[in-house]
Image (cartoon, rainbow, N blue to C red):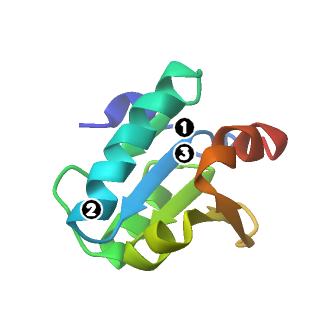
Amino acid sequence: PASYLQEKAGEDRKGVFLATIGEEAYKKGFSLLCKLRSSGIVTAIDYQKKSLKAQMRYADKINMRHVIVLGDDELKAGSCLIRDMKDGSEKKVKLNEIASALRASQ
């Protein structure tokens, strides 16, 4: 499915994976996926609605640089959690500031 995103071993991590928890978060995540892609950011999402742990493993497998975690709590707060898969750091970012935060950390 997302084989076009796979990187060769040893290459830098690139792209963003949207990990969603719950139906509302999935809907918002899909909308966000379209916005990020249209702004030129390589983005993927789990269409099978797997567990968060499974989504994180998949993001690591396809060598994504960042994972955006979006669940009910994040939706209520109008924010998301961005995890850097290279160094493991996490930061909370407002939903309307995601694209600029991702560009700044590439």
| Label annotation for residue 16 | 3
| Crowd rating for badge 3 (residues with CA inside 10 Å; few <14, some 14–19, many 20+) | many
Mark 1 residue element = loop
Coordinates of residue 20 in the picture (x, y in percent): 35, 63
Above or below, 42 relative to 31? above
Say what amino acid the circle numbered 1 marks: Lys
Of labels 3 and 1, earlier in sequence is 1
The disc label shown at residue 24, or none: 2
* Residue 69 point in image, percent of width and height: 49, 66
Quadrant where the C terminus sits is top right
**Are dots 1 and 2 in contact, CB under 8 Å?**
no
Q: Nearer the viewer, residue 63 or 42?
A: 42
* Residue that numbered label 1 is attached to: 8
What residue lies at 49% left-to-right and 60% top-to-bottom? 60
> How far apart, in angstroms, are the residues tagged by discs 3 and 1?
17 Å
| Residue kind at label 2, given as amino acid type | Glu
Which SS class for mark 3? strand
